[in-house]
Amino acid sequence: MKKVNLERYFKLFTNDEAEVFFDNALKQQQIDFVKREIPDSKFTEYFFQEKDLPFVEHVNECLKEKESEETLNTLEKFKRKPFVFEFLTFVLIVLIIMLLFSI
């Protein structure tokens, strides 16, 4: 494998969940990149050449849109079950009361 001077590359970090999507999108765009796992972290470090930055930014925007869609879907599921929030509030109040009486 050829040694690459990473000093002249631009960095981008992604988390584990985004890594698969990001890798596939970069390969589809035929962008050359170097990927390095960060030890004891859930993030991966990517390095790109300056000429590829507009393409990388486009891929990153698509990733942000995908993550926001997933977040909205999760929130919608939570909103559909309002009793879950009420139940958790009730449990919290009971725990606080139990703590107060135990003192």
Image (cartoon, rainbow, N blue to C red):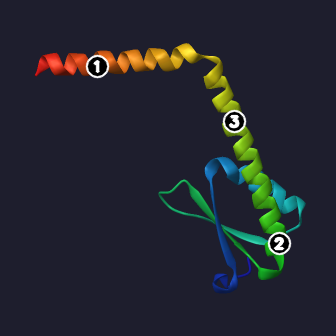
Q: CA distance from mark 2 to mark 3?
A: 27 Å
- Residue placed under numbered mark 2 in the picture: 54
Q: Quadrant of the N terminus?
A: bottom right
Q: CA distance from mark 2 to mark 1?
A: 52 Å
- Residue placed under numbered mark 1 in the picture: 95
Percent coordinates x, y for residue 90 in the rendering: 39, 15
Percent coordinates x, y for residue 26 in the rendering: 82, 62
Q: Which is closer to the viewer, label 2 or label 1?
A: 1
Q: Is residue 103 above or below residue 59?
A: above
Looking at the image, which residue is at 84% across and 68% down? 55
Element class at badge 1 = helix
Q: Quadrant of the C terminus?
A: top left
Percent coordinates x, y for residue 92 in the rendering: 35, 21
Q: Amino acid at mark 3?
A: Leu
Q: Amino acid at mark 2?
A: Pro
Q: Which is closer to the viewer, label 2 or label 3?
A: 3
Percent coordinates x, y for residue 74 in the rendering: 65, 31
Element class at badge 2 = helix
- Residue placed under numbered mark 3 in the picture: 72
- The residue lying toward the viewer, choosing from 83 and 42, is 83
Residue 29 numbered mark, or none: none
Q: Is residue 53 above or below residue 8?
A: above
- Mark toward the start of the polypeptide (2 vs 3): 2
Query: Badge 1: how crowded within 10 Å, few (<14), some, or many (20+)?
Result: few
Asked if the residue under mark 1 is in contact with the one under mark 2, i.e. CB atoms within 8 Å, the reply is no
Q: On the image, which quarter does residue 34 sit in?
A: bottom right
Looking at the image, which residue is at 54% across and 53% down? 42
Q: Is residue 8 above or below residue 79?
A: below
Element class at badge 3 = helix
